[in-house]
Image: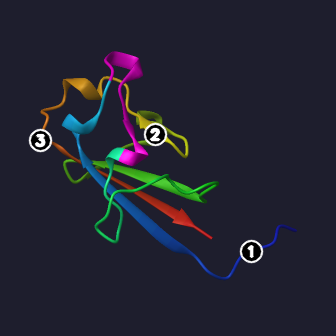
Amino acid sequence: MPIIKSFMASRSFSATAGDGTGVGATYNILATDTINDAGTAATAFPTAPAFYSLYINGQVQTGDTSTVTTTAITIPDGDTLDAETPIVIVFVVN
């Protein structure tokens, strides 16, 4: 039987589509280009989160819309979004 941790928390990071680089399948936003919950520049995304949710312009996205590492989130074709479109990534950690 798996161990269930009794404490879960979340970490939020925000940016705009204009903060990303690359085109097509390689479009990504670096963790260092996001703002964390404390309102300061982030240094990295959480290591091994339980899961994460991506919101583009306030709309939650399906799981196949992005991939994430501790250094960046890749959103294929995200370069087609308006530069001012808000991007929010919420990680659930335990």
* Residue kind at label 1, given as amino acid type: Ile
Q: Is residue 23 magenta?
A: yes
- Residue annotated with mark 2: 72
Instruction: Specify the segment rendered in magenta.
Output: 22-32
* Residue kind at label 2, given as amino acid type: Ala
Pick the residue in front: 55 or 32: 32
Of mark 3 and mark 2, the one earlier in the sequence is: 2
What is the CA distance from the residue labelled 3 to the residue labelled 1?
A: 40 Å
Colouring used for the render: rainbow
Tag in front: 3 or 1: 3
Could you say whether the residue bearing mark 3 is in a helix, strand or loop?
loop
- Give the numbered dot on residue 84: 3
The quarter of the displayed image where residue 27 is located: top left
Q: In this view, does 21 lie above or below 17?
A: above
* Residue at the image point whose x is 41% and y is 21% from the top: 26
Pick the residue in front: 4 or 30: 30
Image quadrant holding the N terminus, namely: bottom right
- Residue annotated with mark 1: 4
Could you say whether the residue bearing mark 1 is in a helix, strand or loop?
loop
